[in-house]
Image: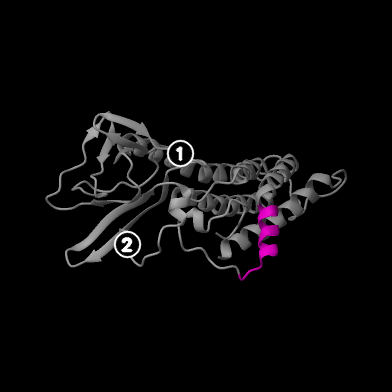
Amino acid sequence: MLPFCLYFVASVITGFHVYTLLALTVYGAPFNPLEFVSLLGSLLLLIAACISLFRPYAAARVALIACLLIWSFYAPATANLMRNGFHRHKIVSCNHEYGWDAIPSIDR
Amino acid sequence: MILPFLALALLALVTVYSAIVSFRRTEGVAPSWLFPNAAKRSAQIVVGILILAPLIALSIWLGFGARHESLRSSRFLIPDGYTGWIRIEFEVQGAPPLPVDHGEYTIKIPAEGVLRTSSAEQYGWARDRYYYYSGQSMRPLPDSGDSALIWGKLNGEASGTSGKQKYEEFFVGTADQFKNQPKVKGSPL
């Protein structure tokens, strides 16, 4: 059950996080295509969690592919966070002309 | 704020774990709690039900909701040549409701740029369209891209002596006009 729990929790947490970022597009934030790729990866990780109950080794390969998809968003976003530092000013305006950036960001 | 870092930590953990499981040799190695074989039949059934039940419930809820909650898009008619902020105030007592034409709200903005209506504000996804009008003729206004003429769309709720006032505002003009407008405190209008 360990692989199932691991894949399932990671899928839900990453999926929910990226979904919240995508939801901000309603308020004018430009969408990043990598967020969609990452969301697809979370879905694939959920499928891997189900497969792990029957075929753990096949599930691990599916999970690895899913992780690569998720990293496609998180890796540049993390690099961007490290580059800009943790003391960046928070954006309070929904007006993208004055603040929103299109580059990947994990903590809008 | 903790969610991104939790997601990152879990993602790193799953990546390492799945990579180890994918590439380790399995011949002659006994299963352990860390690298188990397939789960027991009873566990498979229980987990299958626990996953399928919420998914089916979510599908039913979404399907039911989509049939009963149809968000109308809006067609904004703006006086030809108007430049500046537009404001629409909702749920104003005594004001006329927004007319519905071909399944979408028609919001005809008067020359002063402020429209009051008794209709309620709508929230959610919708494809709104913007037009300059002059008499009976209309021409579309782009609301995205480099040549966009619609900027800074926002909605809010203001409290006053007459109670709470829900409103929506946006700017009509070029990007330069929007950026170079004079900064004022409070409402742009």
A77 within the magenta span: yes
Where residue B187 is drawn, which disc sits there?
2
Q: Chain of mark 1?
A: B
Q: Amino acid at mark 2?
A: Ser
Q: Is residue B70 visible?
A: no
* Residue B119 position in % (x across, y down): 21, 46
* Residue A10 position in % (x across, y down): 62, 53
Q: CA distance from mark 2 to mark 1?
A: 46 Å
Same chain for marks 2 and 1?
A: yes
Q: Which residue is mark 1?
A: B56
Instruction: Report the label total.
Output: 2
Looking at the image, residue B4 sits to the left or right of residue B87; the answer is right
Q: Chain of mark 2?
A: B
Q: Which residues are magenta?
A: A74-87
Question: What residue is drawn where x is 28% and y is 31%?
Answer: B103
Question: What residue is drawn where x is 24% and y is 59%?
Answer: B165
